[in-house]
Amino acid sequence: MAILPLVILPDQRLRLVSEPVGTVTAEIRKIADDMLETMYDAPGVGLAGIQVGVQKRIVTIDTSKEEGARRPQVFLDPVITWESEETRGYEEGCLSIPDYYAEVTRPDRVRVRFRDLDGREQEIEADGLLATCLQHEIDHLNGVLFIDHISKLKRDRVMKKFAKAAKRDAA
Ligand code: K1U
Ligand code: ZN
């Protein structure tokens, strides 16, 4: 397993739409393993392929709270098939936008269809942090960031801060 470098705002790769995984190969399993290791190392509760430069519809999530009881989950080609009318606000963060948090309102519950690492079709109904995280990660697969769900004023301020930091790092 390997820890992969994270793609950070304003890197334009974060705006790409990711490609379907298709057949589950050894290469896909290796990418998922590396993504899990990168997510645990960060640390984070979720990760999408494009955040490590892999333009494929792969998501890893672990929303378990205890250190010693990991519950890694891998979602290939996930699709939201249903979302609740009730919404909830959650203070979100993003490994590609370090140290910035903002409240985002999303559907409270979602149903998601996906394939697992054995290529088997699955469907789950999620609530709480898992529901929020699945929506955040599926947004990444479509080139959407959580700052797209906040006000333009706040978004412009964050974009400016990260553009400035990137310029400084490049100098
Ligand atoms: O996709 C990502 O950038 C990962 C992101 C997922 C996420 C968090 C919160 C709400 C929605 C989606 C993160 O994991 S940010 C880091 C984080 O939330 C965290 C870090 C350490 C412990 C617990 C949480
Ligand atoms: Zn994110």
Image (cartoon, rainbow, N blue to C red):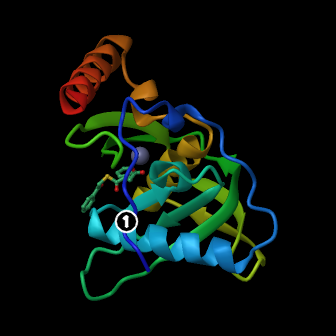
Determine whether 140 is above or below 102 in the image: below
Query: Quadrant location of residue 74?
Result: bottom right
Residue 165 image offset from top left, x and y in percent:
21, 28
Residue 140: give x, y in percent of width and height: 53, 43
How many numbered marks are there? 1
Q: Which residue is mark 1?
A: 39
Residue sitting at x 34%, y 20%: 155
In terms of depth relative to the viewer, which is nearer, 48 or 137?
48
Query: Which residue lies at the image location 37% right of the left edge and 65% below the top edge?
Result: 39
Residue 108 visible to an observer of this rendering: no
Please state which of residues 36 and 5 is positioned toward the viewer in this rendering: 5
**Left or right relative to 163: residue 123:** right
Q: Quadrant of residue 17?
A: top right
Q: Quadrant of the N terminus?
A: bottom left
Q: Nearer the viewer, residue 111 or 94?
A: 94
On the picture, is 27 further left or further right than 89?
right
Mark 1 residue type? Met
Question: Is residue 113 at all visible to an observer of this figure?
Answer: yes
Q: Residue at x 62, y 49 (%)?
A: 55
Q: Residue furthest top?
A: 153
Q: Position of residue 87 (x, y in %)?
A: 48, 40
Q: Residue at x 20, y 33 (%)?
A: 169
User: Dot 1: what SS?
Assistant: helix
Tell me: 128 left or right of 168. Answer: right
Pick out the residue farthest to the front.
Answer: 171
Q: Is mark 1 within 8 Å of ligand 1?
A: yes
Q: Estimate how packed mark 1 is, as few (under 14), some (14 to 19) or many (20 or more) residues with alpha carbons within 10 Å.
A: many
Q: Is residue 133 above or below residue 121?
A: above
Q: Quadrant of the C terminus?
A: top left
Q: Name the residue at the bottom extreme.
A: 68
